[in-house]
Image (cartoon, helix red, strand yellow):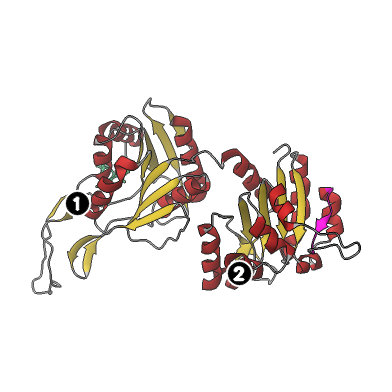
Amino acid sequence: MNGKRILIGVTGGIAAYKICTLVRLLKKEGAEVKCVLTPSAKDFVSPLTLSTLSAYPCYINFWNKENGEWNSHVELGLWADLMLIAPLTANTLAKLANGYCDNLLTACYLSCKAPVIVSPAMDLDMYEHKTTKKNIDKLIDNGVKVIESEYGELASGLIGHGRLPEPESLLKEVQSFFKNSNRFIGKKVLITAGPSYEKIDPVRFIGNRSSGKMGFQIAAALLNQGAEVVLLAGPNKEHLSHKNLKIITFESTEDLLKSVQLYWHQMDIGIFSAAVADYKVKETYAQKVKKSSEEWTITLIKNPDTLAWAGEHKKETQFLVGFALETENEIENAQKKLHKKNLDLIILNSLQNKGAGFQHDTNQISIINKEGEQINFPLKSKKEVAEDIISCIYKNI
Ligand code: CTP
C-alpha cells in the first residue's frame, strides 16, 4: 500500500462517518488519500475532519468559491491508482450507472482511468429494489468492483442487507485489490456450475438441490482478478454480469458436454463445480406421462462425465480442477478421482459440517493437489471459499 494513491468518493449516506476511520487506516498503511464529497455528503461527515485526516483538501465543488480555483476532476481522476466510492447511495449509484456528471464526484468517476471499487449502502428495500440491482449490474458490466453490503441493523431500525462494511473490512478489500488485481490477467477460465435437469417428459425431470452459488462465486472472484470467464450454468437463481464474462446455460449433462467440447481447447484453466447427474433417463417421453398404472419404473443410464472428458483432452499447458462430494473415506476417494480424471487439483466438499454443501451460503473444503498435499479450511462464506480456491490455483499453476 506504500505510496498508493487512493481517491475516496463519499456520498450522502449515514455510514459516511465510517470513512474517517478508513482514511486513518489507509494512511497508517502508507497510502496517500484524497477525498471527494458530493454536496450532501458534508451533511453527514465534516470536510474538515476528512481533510485533516487525509492531509489534503476535501474536494466538493468544481471550483473553489473563495478564490475561483478549479478543482480539476480530470487531474483527480488521473492522480488515483484506485477510486473507492463508499458509502455509495442509491442516488449516486443511479447517476454512475447512467453517466450523469452533475457534481465533482460523478465527474471524477467518469474521468478516472484507475480501477473503481464501490460499496453501496442504503436501506434494505432500496437495496433490494430491481432498479438498484440493475444499476449495480451496469457498474459491474463497466468493470467496477462492487463490495456486497453487509447484513445487520440499518439506520432506519430495520434489519437486512444494505449496511456499509466496517472500515477494517473496507481496508481489507483495498489491500486485497492491490495484492491480487492482476493475478489472472490474460487467463481464460471455463467454469461449470449448478445442477443438471435430466428430462423424463415435458413436465418432469430428475435434478438435485445444487444452487450453483459456489461456481458463480468462483467466477466473480476470477473476474475481479482479471480473468476472462466462460461460465456454463445449469438451472439456477444466481446473477452475475461482467464485460469479461460469457454465461452459457445448460439443462442436461449431455448439453453441458457439448459446451465443454466447444470451449475447453481454448481455455487455460477449467474449474468443474457443477453437480450434474451421473445418470440420465434411458427413455424420455414426448408427451406428459399419465398416471395410468400403480407403479412406474424408470431406467437410468450413465451420463457422460464432462470433467473426465476435459481431463482426457487436457493439454500440457492447461490446468484442471474438479470437485468431489464424499461421505466416506473422503480423502482417499478424492485422491482417486484426482488421478482417474487427470486433474491438477481437487476440492473436497465436506458434508460433516451443517453449513457446508448444497443450498448454503457457506462451505467447508479441503484442497488436494497432484503431489498429495492437502490444505483443510474452516467453514467460511462461499465468497471466501472462492478466494481460497483461486489463490490455491494461482499458487499451483
Ligand atoms: N462431473 C462431471 N460430469 C459428470 C459427473 C461429475 O463433470 N457427469 C464432475 C463434477 O463437476 C465434479 C466431479 O466430476 O467436479 C466429481 O463428481 P462426483 O459426482 O462427486 O464424482 P464421480 O466421479 O461422479 O464419482 P461418484 O459419484 O462415484 O462419487
For the view shown, which residue lies furthest in the right direction? 66
* Residue 98 in view: yes
Position of 5 with respect to 124 (left or right) is right
Q: Which residue is mark 2?
A: 94
Q: Position of residue 112 (x, y in %)?
A: 65, 54
Q: Which residue is mark 1?
A: 279
Position of 86 with respect to 288 (left or right) is right
Q: Amino acid at mark 2?
A: Ala
Q: Determine the residue positioned at 44% across, 30% down.
A: 396
Mark 1 Cα shell of 10 Å, populated few (<14), some (14-19), many (≥20): some
Judging depth in this view, the residue of 3 and 70 nearest the camera is: 70
User: Does residue 84 lie above or below 295 as drawn?
Assistant: above
Q: Quadrant of residue 333?
A: top left
Judging depth in this view, the residue of 168 and 222 nearest the camera is: 222
Q: Determine the residue positioned at 36% across, 47% down.
A: 273
* Residue 165 in view: no
The circle drawn on residue 175 is none
Q: Position of residue 365 (x, y in %)?
A: 44, 41
Q: Quadrant of ligand 1?
A: top left
Position of 28 with respect to 188 (left or right) is right
For the view shown, which residue lies furthest in the top direction? 371
Disc nearer the start of the sequence (2/1): 2
The residues colored magenta run 55-61
Q: Position of residue 257 (x, y in %)?
A: 24, 49
For the view shown, which residue lies furthest in the left direction? 293
* Residue 60 belongs to the span the image colors magenta: yes
Position of 309 with respect to 108 (left or right) is left
Q: Position of residue 23 (x, y in %)?
A: 76, 49
Q: Are marks 2 and 1 in contact (CB under 8 Å)?
A: no
* SS of the residue under disc 2: helix
